[in-house]
Image: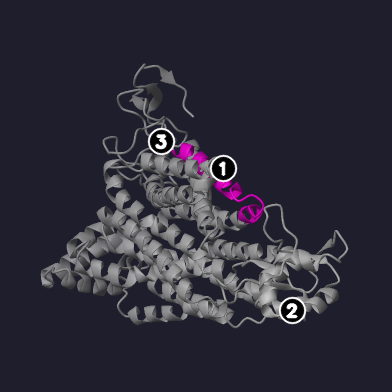
């Protein structure tokens, strides 16, 4: 018996689940949003120019004059950030010392440079930098001079953060199943808060970098643990709801983070501001239950029964002796079935690639997952580089996601997964690439691109979970997401290359989205389909051939001889409702051909 049958007895989406999701699990998305993107502003690079010690007394009140005297212009007409003129500034200072303030306000640099050698040599900055503090009072870039030939250290910090996320996604994925959902979440949360708060007291760049690596380790687990717990507390029909609501909470976290940054502009104070308030989540420790589904899987039936009784009472189900006995029988049946299933067969990553159909689907899903993760993180990282108000740009990047989710909610039920995924990725990709042709509306196109990638980021995990067979579903999802975490490691380097060409990262990300969008058309639609349970059923789900093609099955004989590997689970009977059957090496049950629904001609399969 499936555990979902047990949930229906106690209420698969009652008051209990609604209270837990709204009061505990939604706020749990804040730590991930805060710590994943606060580094963009902790390590923000403000405008800067070379420091000239001789002109220091005039830099505070007459900064424009000082720049005109000492800083050359770049090819865009602005002041250079990494070079200065090599002049005899002592002569210039003697002239400035005898000028009253009104004259200095009107003073033109050309008047002071008449007696200077022309042209002056341009040299790299010799005495450090001055920074524009009108936006940020202090960042790690200002404190440790991470500019010019040291600017790569800012990108390195994002790469190290991404490496931490990759390792954390792999390591903590096992710990969630070992420790349980609730203790894992609070252990990660405590580690994340401690590391982020400690980074506020870092005394040099490499200490801060090491602590950011620790924060990066915990970010994927912080996001995944509440989500997994949410979908395990509700029935199958409400899992789309949990997915949408989880993403709404994450986007709200980005919007709230923009507000925090607007108020707190010092990097040390900001590190504390995005970490210490999250300690309030520990007040929900005794409200947040452990997943009864996980408790059943590990044999802790008594604890699962206790939680299910509380769930039933809150959901208005009458808990009497008959109900308890019926629930215990169902739990025992479910536990026995799961134990038999777990002890019979063990699956590994190689099972995802054993059959040609499963292999192609795994590779396509992983490619799309990589594209989605890379572009979503890349666009979020790119928001401050769009020009104008960096904080406002980041606020827009989070806010434009919210209407997308509201439109996506009914769309997934009426239009399915595959076409929404394709359209979302295509629209987002075209918008990003179009910034090369229409640079005057880059911000608008960026917002359209962010809406597209936000939509596809919701659909993909849902589609993948419905394509991977039950016996390898968790393994397949973990494999695809771990490979996709390479994206946040690579994407900061692409954004760093965009310092010379603003739209270059958008073009690269747009091309990646378009490629992933067309790849999604090869995947089959899963709306209103039975989920594949075994590897044979998963292998029997064919790749899609767009709208004009279908798969027809022809029996080789009236009673087919079914040959199944004894090491694998038994496949369902002939009358079971599964996807279209195809002839595969794993199951030789039927002979299939692909024919066009219009011309009726046979099409070679992939």
User: At 85% from the left edge and 58% from the top edge, which residue is drawn?
Assistant: 119
Residue that numbered label 3 is attached to: 563
Q: Which mark is residue 436?
A: 1
Q: Which mark is residue 454?
A: none
Residues shaded magenta: 493-520
Q: Say whether disc 1 or disc 2 marks the residue closer to the N-terminus.
A: 2
Residue 350 is situated, as x and y percent measured from the top left of the image, at 53, 48
Residue 472 is situated, as x and y percent measured from the top left of the image, at 43, 51
Kind of element beneath mark 1:
loop
Task: Say left or right for 6 vs 570.
Answer: left
Work out whether residue 160 or residue 472 is closer to the camera in this orientation and state it: 160
Q: What is the crowding at mark 1: few (fewer than 14 residues within 10 Å), some, or many (at least 20)?
A: some
Task: Say left or right for 590 vs 190.
Answer: left
Which-is-in-front pick, marks 3 and 2?
Answer: 2
| Main secondary structure type of the part rendered in magenta | helix
Residue 183 drawn in magenta: no
Residue 511 drawn in magenta: yes
Kind of element beneath mark 2:
loop
Looking at the image, the residue that sits furthest to the right is 117
Label 1 and label 3: CA atoms lie apart by 56 Å
Work out whether residue 390 or residue 331 is closer to the camera in this orientation and state it: 390
User: At 38% from the left edge and 40% from the top edge, which residue is drawn?
Assistant: 418
Residue that numbered label 2 is attached to: 99
User: At 63% from the left edge and 74% from the top edge, which residue is drawn?
Assistant: 140
């Amino acid at each position: 018996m499936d555990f979902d049958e047990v949930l229906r007895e106690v209420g698969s989406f009652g008051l209990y689940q609604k209270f837990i999701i709204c009061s505990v699990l939604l706020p749990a998305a804040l730590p991930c949003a805060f710590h994943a993107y606060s580094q963009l502003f902790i390590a923000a690079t403000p405008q800067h120019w070379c420091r000239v010690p001789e002109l220091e007394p005039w830099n505070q009140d007459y900064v424009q004059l000082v720049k005109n005297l000492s800083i050359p212009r770049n090819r865009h007409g602005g002041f250079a950030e990494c070079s200065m003129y090599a002049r005899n500034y002592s002569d210039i200072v003697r002239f400035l010392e005898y000028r009253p303030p009104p004259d200095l306000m009107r003073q033109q640099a050309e008047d002071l440079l008449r007696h200077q050698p022309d042209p002056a040599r341009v040299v790299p900055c010799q005495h450090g930098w001055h920074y524009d503090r009108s936006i940020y009072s202090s960042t790690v870039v200002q404190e440790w001079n991470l500019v010019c030939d040291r600017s790569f250290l800012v990108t390195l910090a994002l790469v190290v953060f991404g490496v931490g996320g990759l390792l954390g996604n792999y390591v903590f994925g096992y710990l969630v199943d070992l420790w349980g959902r609730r203790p894992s979440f609070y252990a990660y949360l405590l580690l994340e808060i401690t590391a982020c708060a400690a980074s506020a007291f870092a005394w040099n760049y490499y200490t801060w970098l090491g602590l950011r690596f620790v924060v990066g380790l915990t970010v994927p687990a912080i996001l995944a643990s509440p989500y997994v717990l949410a979908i395990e507390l509700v029935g199958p029909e409400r899992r789309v709801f949990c997915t949408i609501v989880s993403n709404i909470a994450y986007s709200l976290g980005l919007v709230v983070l923009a507000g925090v940054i607007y108020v707190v502009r010092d990097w040390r104070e900001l590190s504390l501001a995005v970490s210490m308030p999250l300690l309030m989540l520990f007040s929900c420790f005794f409200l947040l239950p452990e997943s009864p589904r996980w408790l059943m899987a590990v044999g802790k039936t008594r604890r699962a029964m206790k939680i299910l009784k509380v769930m039933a009472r809150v959901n208005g189900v009458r808990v009497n002796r008959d109900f308890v006995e019926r629930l215990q029988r169902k739990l025992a049946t479910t536990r026995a079935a799961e134990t038999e299933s777990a002890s019979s067969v063990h699956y590994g990553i190689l099972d995802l690639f054993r059959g040609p159909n499963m292999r192609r689907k795994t590779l396509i899903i992983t490619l799309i997952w990589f594209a989605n993760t890379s572009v979503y993180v890349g666009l979020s990282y790119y928001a401050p580089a769009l020009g104008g108000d960096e904080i406002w740009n980041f606020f827009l990047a989070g806010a434009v996601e919210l209407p997308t989710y509201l439109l996506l909610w009914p769309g997934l039920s009426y239009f399915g997964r595959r076409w929404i995924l394709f359209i979302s990725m295509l629209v987002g990709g075209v918008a990003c690439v179009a910034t090369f042709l229409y640079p005057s509306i880059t911000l608008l196109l960026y917002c359209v691109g962010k809406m597209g990638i936000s939509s596809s980021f919701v659909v993909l995990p849902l589609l993948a979970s419905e394509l991977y067979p039950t016996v390898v579903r968790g393994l397949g999802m973990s494999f695809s997401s771990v490979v996709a975490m390479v994206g946040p490691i690579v994407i900061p380097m692409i954004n760093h290359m965009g310092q010379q060409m603003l739209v270059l990262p958008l073009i690269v990300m747009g091309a990646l989205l378009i490629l992933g969008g067309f790849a999604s058309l090869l995947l089959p639609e899963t709306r209103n389909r039975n989920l594949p349970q075994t590897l044979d059923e998963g292998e029997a789900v064919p790749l899609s051939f767009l709208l004009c093609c279908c798969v027809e099955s022809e029996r080789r004989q009236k009673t087919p001889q079914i040959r199944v590997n004894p090491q694998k689970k038994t496949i369902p009977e002939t009358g079971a409702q599964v996807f279209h059957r195809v002839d595969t090496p794993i199951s030789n049950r039927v002979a299939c051909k692909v024919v066009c629904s219009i011309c009726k001609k046979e099409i070679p399969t992939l």
